Every structure is written in C-alpha cells, then in structure tokens.
Image: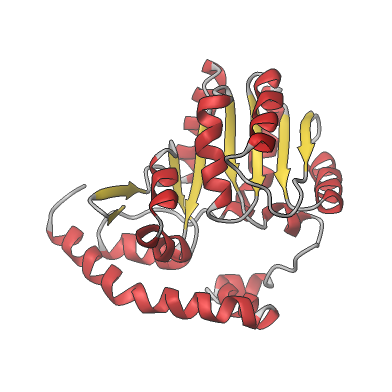
Amino acid sequence: MEFRFRGETVSVNVPTRADLDRVLRKRFAAGEGFALATVNLDHLVKLPASEAFLSAYLQQDLVVADGRPVVWLSRIARRPVELMPGSDLVMPLCRLAAELDIPVAMVGSSPQALKDAQEVISAQAPGVRFGLIHAPPHGFDPEGDAADAIFGRLAALGPCLCFIALGAPKQEVFAGRGRRLAPQAGFASVGAGLDFLGNHQRRAPRWMRALALEWLWRAMLSPMRLVPRYLACFAILPRQLRAAMRLRHSGPG
C-alpha cells in the first residue's frame, strides 16, 4: 500500500506480522539497524503539510499500518496489509529482543512511565536486558545536542532495540537521525505504547478496539486536543479513497 505526497511515495512495506518478524530477525542477526514507523490517518494529514515530517518518513526503513482506515484503504486498493498499532508491537518486539539477547532502550514519555513500563516488560518478557532508559525534558529537540548525546549512548550499546515515545513527528525525526548516528540500533516509534503498559494512559477497552472505535474512546478522554485532529482525519478520507481506487485500477503493486 502506498501514499503519495509532494511527488514522493510513502509505502507500507511490511504488510504482515510474520513479515515484520522475519525482517527484524534478519536485521538483528546482521547487526543492521532500522527505523520502524506506524502510519495512521493522522500521519496522512501531517505528511503533506510538513516537509520535515515527510523527509523523516522517507528515512524509515520499515512502515506498518497503524489504524483501521489505513487497512481499509489498502483493501480497497487491493494491496492488503495487516493492522499493526505501535502499542500492540511493544511486547512482541521485547520478547524477540529477549530471545535474541538484544538490549532494549526506551526514549520519551516520563521517568515514572518508563519505570512502570520497564517493570511490565520484565515480567512479560523473561530474560529481557535493558540498556538506555531516558525521558527527555519538555521541549526536547530531536535534532539538537541532547538528541546527539542519546545517539552516542545507543551507538555504544551496539545492536539494540530502541522504543521511541515522543509522539509524531518528533519520534520519526529522531529515528531518521538515529539511523545515521547509531546505525546498529533498531528504532521503533510507538507513540503512547509505553504509557499504556504502565497505565499512564488508558487504552480503549478491547470491545471498542474490535469495533474500530478506539478513536472515539480517545476523543472522549481528551476532546480539546483530539476532536480537531479527528475532524482533520475525516476530512482527508474522500481524497484517500479516490487515491486507493486509482491504485486498485492500476493493477498489482
């Protein structure tokens, strides 16, 4: 599945969880890092409006579908992909890291949220090793000196898995730079995924997620921040539907 902005193409290039597991095992075995992004409808709103965000996305090695609208669009385009929210990837990736003896790092969120996430991960992924755990202060610049210091510490770890919980677009920008400055690190942008682990943010009940209503749950919890965001997401759906239909009629991807 692909989306086009400013003459560039952002592709969901890892369509299934099995594909993701295979690719990550191969990269870890080779000591080769990666940047993993989880594209959703909010990102599709931001990408054409921000040259920096688009540039960061084009530096991501692996892109998966985070959000049912992206999955639905892929089906319309006859390029189906599986739903892989960043929040659902944290524990499977931690278990993979534990199996391969790859240290796990966490950057973002808050000190207490990271501490609580670390405890949950330790309990649910036996054998996991932790490297860097760092909650940057408010106003953190993913392209500044503080970010460079983090990259230096990650580079010293060698091959590692680094979860980034800075929110878009900061986390994708951070991951894009990390590919150059800590090339053996695997960066996974997971948004609120670490906060969910320690219950610092409340995730929608499973039945709402099953009915594709997680957006409604989040909007009710934070209406001032999220209702405008979701309205912007709904506004781009007709355009994205037309683009998906064009892909459908262009033949196999």
Q: 88 or 199: which is nearer to us?
A: 199
Residue 179, position in %: x, y? 51, 30
Q: Kindly tell me whether residue 125 is visible in this rendering.
A: no
Colour scheme in use:
secondary structure
Quadrant housing residue 221: bottom right
Residue 155, position in %: x, y? 65, 21
Residue 26, position in %: x, y? 49, 23
Relative horizontal placement of residue 14, taking residue 75 as reference (left or right): right
Relative horizontal placement of residue 105, taking residue 56 as reference (left or right): right
Relative horizontal placement of residue 250, taking residue 26 as reference (left or right): left
**Residue at 81% across / 56% down in the picture?**
198
For residue 185, above or below residue 134: above
For residue 166, above or below residue 62: below
For residue 136, above or below residue 217: above
Q: Kindly tell me whether residue 95 is visible in this rendering.
A: yes
What is the count of numbered marks? Answer: 0
**Residue at 74% across / 59% down in the picture?**
196
**Residue at 33% across / 55% down in the picture?**
80
Residue 90, position in %: x, y? 66, 46
